[in-house]
Amino acid sequence: MSTKSDACAQPGLMAPQDAINALLAQVSVIEDSEMVGLNDAVGRILSEDLASCIDLPPFDNSSMDGYAFRFDDLTGETATTLTQVGTSFAGHPYTAPIKPNTCIRIMTGAPVPAGYDTVQMQEKTQADGESITIEHPSAKGNSIRYRGEELLAGTNVLKSGTQIRAAEMGVLATIGISQVRVKRRLTVAFFSTGDELRPVGSELAPGQIYDSNRYSIQGLLTQANVEWIDLGVIEDDKEAIRGAFKEAADRADMVLTSGGVSVGDADYTKQILSEEGEITFWRLAIKPGKPFAFGKLGNAVFCGLPGNPVSSMVTFYKLVWPIINKMQGLTPKPALVVNATLSTPIRKQPGRAEYQRGILSRNENGELIVASTGGQGSGMLTSMSLANCFINLDQDQGDIAAGATVHVEPFTSVLC
């Protein structure tokens, strides 16, 4: 394949990581917090460390169905017969005094009575009425989960900045915590501008298009677990747009728009932003998504995305999402990037880092492979809906043949 330089890669474009570092240096964590019930905590971010008030497990318990007994009652290598004197169920422990040469039936999770120190699985015993014969002596302490072996009371369980997922919900319930203090949800206001935009479901006149970006942004904000305010489509009127910006800045922590931030854009957006806020218009060495605006609009953070649908989504993923995470107090984690074998050739011009949309899967040998979704134009939104990953291509990278190893960033942390 021949490789040509990217005609849009003018001198002075900012590298992606430099842009992210600069953006994150200019935003702060929201200080407000609130108490929420455990049922409402999923997706929220802890604003304080949490310690356990109990040992975990809170008592010695059996890890399987079987029989509990004193190890010293076993007679060496020969079979030992013990008398069964009761049963311990989960939630209904055996409480009678322990006597020598006895055992109890015990269920998984049931408390092991004080005095018994070993559990033998039922498959390795023989029952005859009230007599239990153990033919293969187990090791002392076998099949017992001891009190506090996972954690002791007072141990920090979850740190401030942790996002509460299903596993954290289970941990909190396990240690008996019914309410948690979390960061207030970030509020993001957004709207679209343009007389060419029509509501979904309406008839299109010549030259009109449906307002897709606003719905993509709404979906991304929902995935980011923020509160969002949709101000709709604002007509191409200077004062109407100014009013929308002021309302958004008054009601939200962040204002987000798409379009109107490119060099040569013939609308009121850039003029109003310059008059009402402290906004910098950036030119980034990424594709798609070169134009980006950032700054302050009143007390709100402002992010201006490109108008092309794919460019808008890519810059949200790469730039806006890290900003949201920091403002919400989420502990930063590097993006998961894996190596995969390219199953389709890729065309790329050197000059800008490129995030092509790909489909990550496994071949018959279980190895990761990735294919391009096809056309990669910045207006081809289907390239995003077909994709489950970005194929991350360095700024100096040119065309790549099938069979090469490439860096892939899955949209979720769970690999296919």
Image (cartoon, helix red, strand yellow):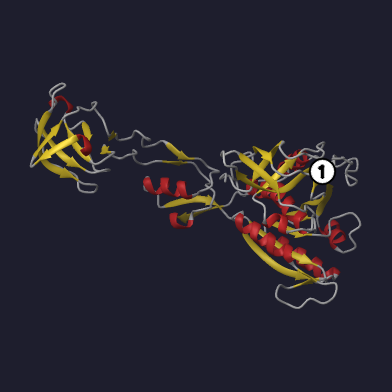
Q: Is residue 223 left or right of residue 407?
A: left
> Which residue is at a point 75% across and 39% down the rendered structure image?
17
Position of 227 relative to 158 (above/below): below
Image spot of residue 412 (x, y percent): 60, 48
Q: Quadrant of the N terminus?
A: top right
Front residue of 92/311: it is: 311
| Residue 230 image offset from top left, x and y in percent | 68, 66
Q: Position of residue 255 (x, y in %)?
A: 72, 58
What is the secondary structure assignment of the residue under circle 1? loop
| Residue appearing at x 85%, y 68% in the figure | 238
Residue at point 30% right, 40% down? 58
Is 187 left, or right, of 167 in this rendering?
A: right
Residue 69 position in % (x across, y down): 16, 33
Name the residue type under label 1: Lys
**Residue 89 visible within the image:** yes
Quarter occupied by residue 266: bottom right
Q: Is residue 275 above or below residue 356?
A: below
Pick the front one: 403 or 224: 403
* Other residues around mark 1 within 10 Å, as few (<14) / some (14–19) / many (≥20): many
Name the residue carrying label 1. Answer: 348
**Residue 29 seen in render:** no
Q: Is 195 displayed left or right of 175 in the figure?
A: right
